[in-house]
Amino acid sequence: METILQLPVTFTSGAIIELKRLFSEGDRSKPFLRVGVKGGGCSGMTYVLEYDDQQEGDQIFEVEGIPVVMNKAHEMYLYGMTIAFEGGLNSRGFTFVNPNASSTCGCGTSFAV
């Protein structure tokens, strides 16, 4: 189990507040918040933000008391990304601002590099 000091992505204060709320109310059978990517979506890759267990190749981080895992191989796609939470009437949910993305889809949940 490898622990490093700085998560390669940044969470805004709004995202941290929402994550803490979800962690206090959510499925505690999975101890970590997973940040990552997977193939699919309109632009080729989709962001992953979900409860999960630690898996081989994961690095463990802590963000304001929230245990986070990310596969080391995903860092190249996510380094420098900011995750925010929008709570407005027109758009509600987590948003991803990724400086590594060469293009994104209209919904903002998939990207290409």
Image (cartoon, rainbow, N blue to C red):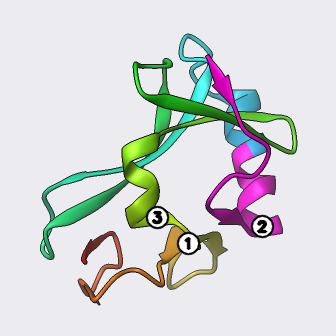
Disc 3 marks which amino acid? Answer: Leu
Q: Residue at x 72, y 53 (%)?
A: 18
Disc 2 marks which amino acid? Answer: Gly
Q: Position of residue 8 (x, y in %)?
A: 62, 59
The residue where tag 3 is placed is: 78
Q: Residue at x 75, y 69 (%)?
A: 12
Q: Position of residue 54 (x, y in %)?
A: 50, 19
Q: Position of residue 82 (x, y in %)?
A: 61, 73
Q: Residue at x 70, y 47 (%)?
A: 19
Q: Which residues are magenta?
A: 1-19
Q: Is residue 17 above or below residue 65?
A: below
Can residue 10 be found in the magenta stretch?
yes
Q: Is residue 23 left or right of residue 111?
A: right
Q: Secondary structure at mark 3?
A: helix
Q: Secondary structure at mark 2?
A: helix
Q: Is residue 41 left or right of residue 22?
A: left
